[in-house]
């Protein structure tokens, strides 16, 4: 009596029973709703988004706490604007068109400088990778110029170019030029020679091999270069705008400091962060569209 | 002799007929190739004479490093012979051409092109229009049973599948000669056997000249009409063996006494050269691990 009652009083069946019982409910119960299935399939991505949101929230909270309580632990948060201050100044800034003009001008400079750099560095890198002599001519010069930070070019750029606008675009160009060139070169060096030989055996001419093999084989590296180049372009642009600009988000940030509008400093910084993020995201998107074979 | 004819349903594919290839005679006379290295000139291949008759399947077999791939690369047009002449249908080879299709041991499909675009590549290089070459590629893929994969990118295919697509791609332009450089070397044993079967069937229908480089004896015997055995570096032709097995070749033949006799003969030829390639001085005792005379003591006591 007692022994018979014991197993039935258990809440979970013994392991063997559980194994056989498991498939049964799966077949009898209806399939989960489409929404639920989608959630299951993208579980990893959903978690990443949630954790990311939490992490940003924690950052804002820490910022809020440090600034409201004016924490002064060697690093001084006394004059640092709180998130609420920044939100307030954002509201005023967004009400007029001046702030957006600054943003638009910075974006235009980035676009010109970056596109110019890509338009020169990518073909140059491809040609240098293909023709050793060209590489031997160009490489020493780029190696000397490459370590010079874009900001050190500011005085020279002002002398070189007739307008301020041009010198800022030039500095942005310089910042993104070298990462793009070097990555393209590296990509060319890692093209699988068997693919080149296969193309030649199928009747590809020199030009066709370049277009059909070297270029697509190097594309992933080119996009690495473009992403890095875009990051450096923003760094260079902001530095140039702070020194010699009259417009632009870098100028906005520096001007806020001069005018003791501390919350505008944080607003400018955040805007730069968002713009940088958006532009590298745009490059990734273009890369994914151009390289469907590597999309996962 | 069209590429489309290599599988039974060729009549169902009037959409595609590559140029008629009536020849494909390969002649190599006194071929030698010397590399310049840091220690001076090294002979990779010393002196090779060989012929592939139109429509013949010929294998080259030899120990690793004997220069068989070098020879094939010269035929493809990637290397210039230092000595001798290499001709196809009487014309010397000046560079790579779609006339001579090549299959490599490494998978050489373009990763950025789908299976169909890979097959289309040679036709595109010939200047064929988009619609026409797409139709041709579809037909060929259909004949090879690869239609379900036409829109796949190569990295989603298995190794055997990649090589099948590679062969279809090489045949699409209607070459006179197919050069294969250990094409199944990277495949597992089972896939390899199936690929050999596929290749021999294709060739049977196509009657294209094939020069096949391998170090696998069974593979060479199973596929070939004739086999050239090369010596260790610097490579020379050591022997030429005709394979009298009937066509079509069937997997069961690998167990026949004729096959095994051929295998035994080839084995002893190759073995000599492989030993030479491994350093030459390996004596019979060295091979058994008994090169040191321990004067009757066993190894344990000698140590």
Image: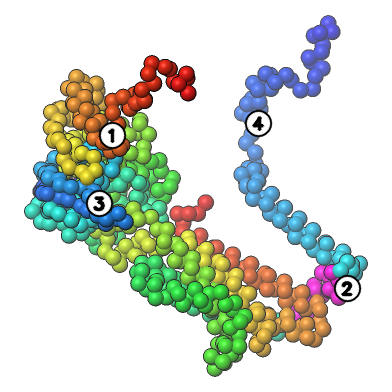
The count of marks equals 4
Magenta portion: prevailing SS class: helix
Q: How is the image coloured?
A: rainbow
Q: Residue at x 81, y 82 (%)?
A: A261
Per the image, label 4 sits on a secondary structure element best described as loop
Q: Chain of mark 4?
A: A
Of labels 3 and 1, earlier in sequence is 3
In which quadrant will I find the N terminus of chain A?
top right
Rate crowding at label 1 as few (under 14), some (14 to 19) or many (20 or more) other CA atoms within 10 Å: few
Between marks 2 and 1 in the image, the one whose residue lies nearer the viewer = 1
Where does label 4 land, which residue?
A: A29
Q: Residue B42, image x and y in percent?
A: 25, 51
Left or right position of A151 against A210: right
Where does label 1 land, which residue?
A: B281
Q: Residue at x 43, y 47 (%)?
A: B155
Between marks 4 and 2 in the image, the one whose residue lies nearer the viewer = 2
Span colored in magenta: A75-94
Per the image, label 1 sits on a secondary structure element best described as loop
Q: Is residue B166 in view?
A: yes
Per the image, label 2 sits on a secondary structure element best described as loop
Left or right position of B211 against A23: left
Q: Is residue B17 in view?
A: no
Where does label 2 land, which residue?
A: A78
* Residue A83 is a magenta residue: yes
Q: Quadrant of residue B294?
A: top left
Q: Quadrant of residue B264?
A: top left
Where does label 3 land, which residue?
A: B42
* Residue A293 is a magenta residue: no
Q: Are marks 3 and 1 on the same chain?
A: yes
């Amino acid at each position: 009596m007692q022994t018979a009652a014991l197993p039935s009083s258990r809440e979970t069946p013994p392991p063997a029973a559980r194994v056989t019982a498991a498939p049964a409910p799966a077949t009898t119960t209806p399939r989960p709703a489409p929404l639920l299935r989608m959630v299951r399939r993208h579980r990893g991505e959903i978690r990443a988004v949630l954790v990311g949101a939490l992490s940003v929230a924690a950052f804002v909270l820490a910022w809020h706490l440090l600034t409201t309580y004016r924490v002064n632990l060697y690093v001084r948060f006394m004059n640092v604007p709180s998130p609420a201050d920044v939100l307030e100044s954002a509201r005023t800034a967004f009400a007029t068109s001046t702030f957006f003009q600054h943003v638009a001008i910075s974006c235009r400079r980035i676009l010109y400088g970056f596109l110019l750099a890509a338009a020169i560095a990518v073909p140059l890198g491809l040609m240098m990778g293909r023709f050793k002599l060209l590489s031997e001519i160009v490489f020493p010069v780029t190696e000397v110029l490459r370590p010079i930070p874009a900001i050190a070019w500011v005085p020279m750029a002002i002398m070189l170019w007739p307008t301020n606008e041009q010198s800022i675009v030039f500095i942005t160009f310089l910042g993104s030029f070298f990462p793009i060139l070097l990555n393209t070169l590296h990509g060319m060096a890692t093209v699988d020679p068997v693919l080149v030989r296969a193309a030649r055996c199928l009747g590809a001419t020199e030009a066709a091999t370049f277009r059909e093999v070297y270029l697509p084989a190097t594309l992933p590296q080119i996009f690495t270069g473009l992403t890095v180049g875009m990051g450096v372009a923003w760094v260079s642009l902001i530095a140039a705008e702070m020194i010699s600009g009259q417009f632009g988000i870098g100028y906005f940030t520096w001007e806020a400091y001069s005018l003791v509008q501390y919350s505008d400093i944080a607003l400018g910084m955040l805007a730069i962060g968002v713009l940088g993020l958006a532009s590298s995201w745009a490059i990734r998107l273009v890369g994914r569209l151009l390289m469907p074979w590597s999309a996962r | 002799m069209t590429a489309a004819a290599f599988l039974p349903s060729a009549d169902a594919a009037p959409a595609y007929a590559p140029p008629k290839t009536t020849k494909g005679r390969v002649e190599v006379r006194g071929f030698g190739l010397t590399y310049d290295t840091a220690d001076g000139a090294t002979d990779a291949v010393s002196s090779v004479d060989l012929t592939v008759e139109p429509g013949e399947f010929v294998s080259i077999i030899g120990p690793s490093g004997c220069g068989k791939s070098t020879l094939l690369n010269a035929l493809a047009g990637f290397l210039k012979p230092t000595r001798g002449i290499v001709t196809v249908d009487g014309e010397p080879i000046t560079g790579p051409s779609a006339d001579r299709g090549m299959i490599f041991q490494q998978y050489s499909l373009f990763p950025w092109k789908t299976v169909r675009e890979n097959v289309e590549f040679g036709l595109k290089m010939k200047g064929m229009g988009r619609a026409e070459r797409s139709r041709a590629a579809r037909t060929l893929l259909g004949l090879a049973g690869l239609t379900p994969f036409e829109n796949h990118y190569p990295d989603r295919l298995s190794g055997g599948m990649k090589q099948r697509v590679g062969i279809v791609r090489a045949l699409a332009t209607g070459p006179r000669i197919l050069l294969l450089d250990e094409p199944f070397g990277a495949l597992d044993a089972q896939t390899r056997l199936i690929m050999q079967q596929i290749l021999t069937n294709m060739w049977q229908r196509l009657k294209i000249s094939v020069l096949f480089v391998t170090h696998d004896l069974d593979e060479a015997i199973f596929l070939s009409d004739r086999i050239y055995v090369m010596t260790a570096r610097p490579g020379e032709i050591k022997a030429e063996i005709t394979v009298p097995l009937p066509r079509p070749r069937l997997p069961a033949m690998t167990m026949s006494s004729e096959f095994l006799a051929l295998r035994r003969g080839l084995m002893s030829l190759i073995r000599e050269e492989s030993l030479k390639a491994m350093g030459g001085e390996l004596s019979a005792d060295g091979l058994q691990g008994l090169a040191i005379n321990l004067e009757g003591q066993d190894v344990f006591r000698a140590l």
